[in-house]
């Protein structure tokens, strides 16, 4: 018999459902098998009237994979208002050892994060955890739809590179035949290259690797970057307008509980510094995480917004390719409840200025031949932005730790499973 998904069950039908035994409850003469599939949970009932079946049911353990055939019958007491009266049951996947963690945690068992991540495949079976990834999936779909609808070209850039544009310290080195290569810490060079290749508007959703201290609740060593770059942008406000439109679509599609005003405030770094200094947080040219958090609270009070663009960051803290604006830069960070979720800027496309800016940061532009040449062969004015998929998921949902938003997280202490 063809399989019916739990979400599609209708009273009166004879069906075959397949999935995991979420819970088994029962009495001497009746057993309730709570079955879970990708689409939902349903109660199935077996009674001792069918002796052979009942014998089999009594041996079952939670998380066994089974196939159940029966009739969907109305039952006011059941959660859904109906249940499946079991007529036949087959075991498709045995549970032959004690489960390392429980999928349904009873009482005050509260497995710690590390143990959960050690047994992530079981942890992901929990409906409440599964929901995080349904949410993330909506972000993915909305992102692709948004960029496609705006005529962006989806690009795929190399994840093994000879060097990056940011400082090398954060890069993982790998053996590449007889030479050394690095795992990509940003698609920056390549997205600029694709703009210079005439695609004009490009985006990528791809892996990013950073050998940085990720023992925080918002860093991992491998994450999914959402990156875009667009040509003929001459004002950072255009970039913010577009980023804002994108974020609003994400909030709408995910129905996230986030306060988004009709226009997200754009506050220059200097003003932010004053706001924080007034509250006793002394910052100079960068905002530390603790100050960012306080900023999130101040912004919520002042602007009734969970989101803020901090603009015109000091040049001293920005990479050489951001367009200068006096002592500042034509760029922004987007913060969600006091956590950075995006950084964007106009990119310097004038070769001579870029070279000078690089020198100021001790970067030798002409050593980066493949990058430098792009600015001597007709580069359009351009700009772009990079966001983190897991950061967005974490902070739209208000999750304590970014690891909750990674299928299988990687950090300095974790290379398994
Ligand atoms: P942070 O200051 O939070 O370390 P960053 O400024 O180094 O971030 P960017 O280089 O601006 O990060 O990267 C763009 C986006 O990628 C960030 O805004 C963030 O959403 C995400 N991101 C950066 N580093 C990480 C990380 N280690 N783990 C998860 N997401 C990250
Ligand atoms: Mg940043």
Image (cartoon, helix red, strand yellow):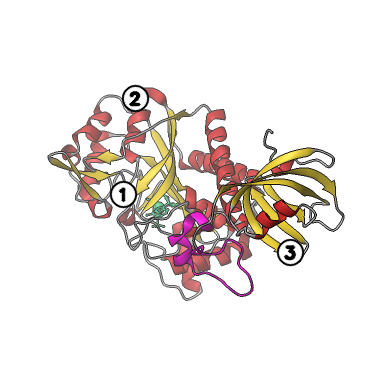
The magenta stretch spans residue 6: no
Displayed quadrant of residue 409: bottom left
Residue 93: x %, y % from top left? 55, 48
Q: Which residue is mark 3?
A: 26
Badge 3 vs badge 2, beta-carbon distance below 8 Å: no
**In this rendering, which labeled residue sits more in front, label 1 or label 2?**
2
* Distance between the alpha carbons at the discs numbered 3 and 1: 64 Å
Q: Residues within 10 Å of mark 2 (few under 14, many from 20)?
A: some
Q: Which residue is mark 2?
A: 197
Q: Is residue 191 left or right of residue 180?
A: right
- In the rendered image, the quadrant that contains the C terminus is bottom left
Who comes first in sequence, dot 3 or dot 1?
3
Badge 3 vs badge 1, beta-carbon distance below 8 Å: no
Q: Which residue is mark 1?
A: 319
**In this rendering, which labeled residue sits more in front, label 3 or label 1?**
3
Secondary structure category for the residue under label 2: helix
Residue drawn at point x = 57 percent, y = 29 percent: 149
Residue drawn at point x = 83 percent, y = 42 percent: 11
Q: Residues within 10 Å of mark 3 (few under 14, many from 20)?
A: few
The magenta stretch spans residue 108: yes
């Amino acid at each position: 018999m063809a399989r019916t998904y739990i979400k599609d069950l209708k009273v009166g039908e004879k069906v075959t459902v397949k999935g995991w035994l979420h819970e088994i409850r029962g009495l001497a003469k009746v057993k309730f098998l709570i079955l879970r599939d990708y689409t939902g949970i349903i109660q199935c009932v077996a009674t001792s009237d069918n002796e052979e079946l009942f014998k089999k049911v009594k041996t079952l353990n939670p998380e066994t994979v089974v196939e159940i055939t029966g009739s969907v019958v109305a039952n006011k007491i059941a959660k859904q208002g109906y249940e499946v009266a079991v007529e036949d049951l087959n075991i498709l996947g045995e549970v032959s050892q004690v489960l390392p963690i429980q999928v349904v945690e009873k009482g005050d068992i509260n497995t710690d994060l590390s143990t959960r991540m050690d047994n992530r495949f079981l942890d992901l079976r929990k409906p409440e955890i599964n929901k995080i990834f349904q949410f993330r999936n909506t972000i993915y779909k909305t992102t692709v739809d948004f960029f496609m609808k705006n005529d962006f070209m989806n690009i795929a850039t190399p994840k093994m590179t000879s060097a990056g544009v940011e400082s090398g310290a954060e890069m993982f080195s790998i053996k590449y035949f007889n030479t050394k290569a690095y795992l990509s810490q940003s698609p920056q060079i390549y997205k600029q290259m694709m703009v210079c290749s005439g695609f004009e508007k490009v985006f990528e959703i791809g892996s990013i690797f950073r050998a940085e201290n990720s023992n925080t609740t918002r860093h991992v060593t491998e994450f999914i970057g959402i990156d875009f770059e667009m040509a003929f942008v001459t004002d950072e406000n255009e970039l913010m307008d577009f980023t804002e439109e994108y974020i609003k679509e994400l909030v709408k599609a995910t129905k996230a509980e986030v306060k988004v005003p009709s226009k997200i405030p754009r506050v220059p770094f200097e003003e932010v510094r004053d706001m924080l200094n007034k509250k006793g947080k002394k910052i100079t040219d960068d905002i530390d995480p603790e100050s960012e958090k306080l900023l999130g609270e101040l912004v919520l009070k002042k602007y009734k917004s969970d989101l803020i663009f901090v603009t015109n960051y000091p040049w001293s803290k920005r990479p050489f390719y951001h367009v200068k604006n006096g002592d500042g830069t034509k760029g922004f960070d987007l913060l969600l409840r006091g956590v950075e979720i995006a950084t964007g800027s106009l990119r310097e496309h004038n070769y001579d200025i870029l070279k000078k800016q690089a020198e100021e940061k001790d970067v030798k532009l002409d050593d980066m031949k493949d990058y430098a040449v792009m600015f001597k062969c007709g580069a359009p004015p351009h700009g772009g932005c990079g966001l983190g998929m897991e950061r967005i998921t974490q902070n739209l949902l208000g999750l304590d730790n970014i690891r909750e938003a990674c299928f299988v997280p990687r950090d300095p202490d974790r290379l398994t499973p």
